Image (cartoon, grey):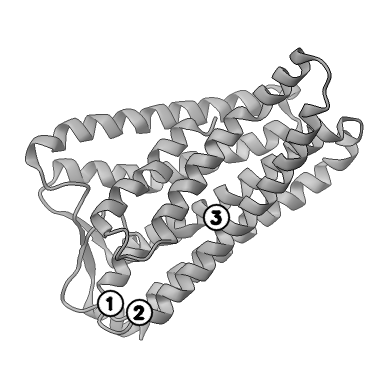
């Protein structure tokens, strides 16, 4: 069926964020600014951590990988999105669409979810078990955690891209989005997509549910430990250590759950495009 699919639809047209002509250039420069900030910030962190031997510790090891994921995440989405603001017809090939779907939906999404949970665990060990930190977060443990992060990224990407490859698309190839996301593509399917939607729900629940439970447990122990710190200065330092991570987690998981775990009748695709901006663009500028 994948072969029939590819022969019936050879390209898709991305509708973009809005059809209002007067908004195209302002939005182009706005998101170009977001992209420049994301690229400069993440490449700067990658360079700084890579060159400074004093930063070769678990906390910055995970931060380095988060920067790599955020940079790659944004590069998979924003350049094609910027084209939609300056071109009359933003076309992406079938292969290009599947590639974007694989790397965005959900290799980088899943990888970011699980790297955030690994960072929460690192924060938990640093605050709750400081004397055992070096042993607990050994290079071997960090490597295994990172292997799990990217392993789950591959799982999410294969599950969702495979989900789409077995669909049959009809003559309509207009994707109501600024990228090849899975929900707008399911809308174009000729055959019943009930099983596909169910697969999306299950896989996204795993991608959001497992990390968020791990993060809640970690921060439950962290907050409990912070309240046992006698000095105000010590509490303030502990809170500041993890506050930016809490903000990033809230934005990323909140917007992702709002987008993918609600029925389409509650969240129409036009509103979903706006909601997806938070975890595809805004979060990449705020996770550090």
- Who's the residue at 91% across and 36% down the image? 132
Task: Give residue 94's quadrant in the image.
Answer: bottom left
Give how far across and how far down residue 157 sits, in percent: 50, 63
- Mark 3 lies on residue: 110
Dot 2 lies on which element? Answer: loop
Quadrant containing the C terminus in the rendered view: top right
Q: CA distance from mark 3 to mark 2?
A: 22 Å
In the depicted structure, whether residue 249 falls above or below residue 263: above
- 240 horizontally vs 195: left or right: right
- Taking 106 as reference, is 118 left or right? right
Circle 1 packing at 10 Å, graded few (<14), some (14-19), many (20+), is some
The label number, if any, that marks residue 193 in the structure image: 2
Give me the residue at 51% from left, 48% from top. Answer: 253
Proximity of marks 2 and 1: CB atoms separated by less than 8 Å: yes
At label 2, counting other C-alpha atoms closer than 10 Å, the crowd grade (few under 14, some 14-19, many 20 or more) is: some
Find residue 189 and name its label. Answer: 1
């Amino acid at each position: 069926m994948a072969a029939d699919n590819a022969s019936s639809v050879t390209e898709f047209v991305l509708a973009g964020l809005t059809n209002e002509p007067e908004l195209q250039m302002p939005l182009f420069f706005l998101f170009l600014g977001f992209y420049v900030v994301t690229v400069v910030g993440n490449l700067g962190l990658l360079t700084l951590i890579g060159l400074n031997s004093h930063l070769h510790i678990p906390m910055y090891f995970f931060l380095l990988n988060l920067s790599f994921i955020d940079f790659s995440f944004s590069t998979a989405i924003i350049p094609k999105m910027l084209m939609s603001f300056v071109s009359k017809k933003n076309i992406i090939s079938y292969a290009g669409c599947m590639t974007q779907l694989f790397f965005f939906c959900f290799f980088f999404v899943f990888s970011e979810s699980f790297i955030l949970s690994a960072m929460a665990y690192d924060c938990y060990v640093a605050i709750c078990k400081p004397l055992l930190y070096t042993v607990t977060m050994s290079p071997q443990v960090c490597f295994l955690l990172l292997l799990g992060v990217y392993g789950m990224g591959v799982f999410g990407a294969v599950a969702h891209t495979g989900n789409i490859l077995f669909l049959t698309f009809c003559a309509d190839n207009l994707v109501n989005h600024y990228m090849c996301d899975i929900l707008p593509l399911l809308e174009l399917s000729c055959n019943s997509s009930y099983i596909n939607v169910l697969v999306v729900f299950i896989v996204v629940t795993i991608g959001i549910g497992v990390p968020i439970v791990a993060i809640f447990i970690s921060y439950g122990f962290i907050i409990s430990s912070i309240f046992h710190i006698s000095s105000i200065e010590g509490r303030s330092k502990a809170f500041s250590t993890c506050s930016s991570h809490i903000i990033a987690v809230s934005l990323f998981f909140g917007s992702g759950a709002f987008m993918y775990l609600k029925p389409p009748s509650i969240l129409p695709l036009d509103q979903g495009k706006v909601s997806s901006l938070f975890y595809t663009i805004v979060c990449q500028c705020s996770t550090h």
